[in-house]
């Protein structure tokens, strides 16, 4: 079992920045990869960024060059630095961990990010 706790969401004006944090606990040794997803009202949940256990990263095209995912292994925490935020980035952001041989999905509770124009 893995528990994920997110923090750092909020309200920001367009062009501003926010940093999301996701602290993992439990069976952290079995985490294969972690990532951030988001879900806007009326839309499907989508991958924003992910980072593997060896540090490889992937990003959605819509956030490339603006968002950066990173991890602090000593703190078992993954971060999402979001710069040059746009109103279309408004969504609930969820932390995800893919765990064990089956790459099972674990989710955080979600944190709201609202970007005003």
Image: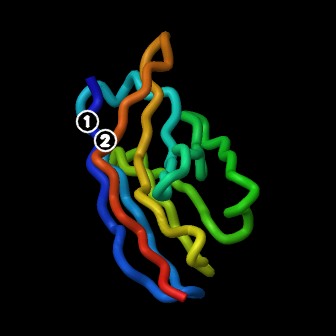
Q: Is residue 108 left or right of residue 103?
A: left
Q: Position of residue 18 (x, y in %)?
A: 45, 75
Q: Is residue 61 left or right of residue 117?
A: right
Label 1 and label 2: CA atoms lie apart by 6 Å
Is residue 91 depicted above or below 26 in this figure? Answer: below
Is residue 67 depicted above or below 77 in this figure? Answer: below
Kindly indicate whether the residue at mark 2 contacts the one at mark 1 (C-beta within 8 angstroms): yes
Name which quarter of the figure residue 8 lies in. Answer: bottom left
Q: Position of residue 30 (x, y in %)?
A: 40, 22
Q: Residue at x 43, y 74 (%)?
A: 114
> Badge 2: few (under 14), some or many (20 or more) residues near its Cα, within 10 Å?
many
Colouring convention used in this rendered image of the protein: rainbow
Earlier along the polypeptide chain: callout 1 or callout 2?
Answer: 1
Q: Quadrant of the C terminus?
A: bottom right
| Secondary element type, mark 2 | strand
Q: Nearer the viewer, residue 116 or 93?
A: 116
Q: Residue at x 34, y 30 (%)?
A: 28
Q: Residue at x 68, y 46 (%)?
A: 58
Q: Nearer the viewer, residue 54 or 93?
A: 93
Q: Is residue 28 left or right of residue 88?
A: left
Q: Residue at x 56, y 77 (%)?
A: 87
Taking the view exactly as shown, the residue that stands out farthest to the top is 101
Q: Which mark is residue 24?
A: 2
Foreground mark, 1 or 2? 1
Q: Quadrant of the N terminus?
A: top left
Q: Which residue is mark 1?
A: 3
Q: Position of residue 50 (x, y in %)?
A: 58, 44
């Amino acid at each position: 079992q893995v528990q994920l706790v997110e923090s750092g969401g909020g309200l920001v004006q367009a062009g501003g920045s926010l940093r999301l944090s996701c602290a993992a606990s439990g069976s952290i040794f079995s985490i294969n990869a972690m990532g951030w997803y988001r879900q806007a009202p009326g839309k499907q949940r989508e991958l924003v960024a992910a980072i593997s256990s060896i540090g490889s990263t992937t990003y959605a095209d819509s956030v490339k060059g603006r968002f950066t995912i990173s991890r602090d292994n000593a703190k078992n925490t993954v971060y999402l630095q979001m710069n040059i935020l746009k109103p279309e980035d408004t969504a609930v952001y969820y932390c995800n961990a893919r765990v064990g041989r089956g790459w099972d999905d674990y989710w955080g509770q979600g944190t709201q990010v609202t970007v005003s124009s």
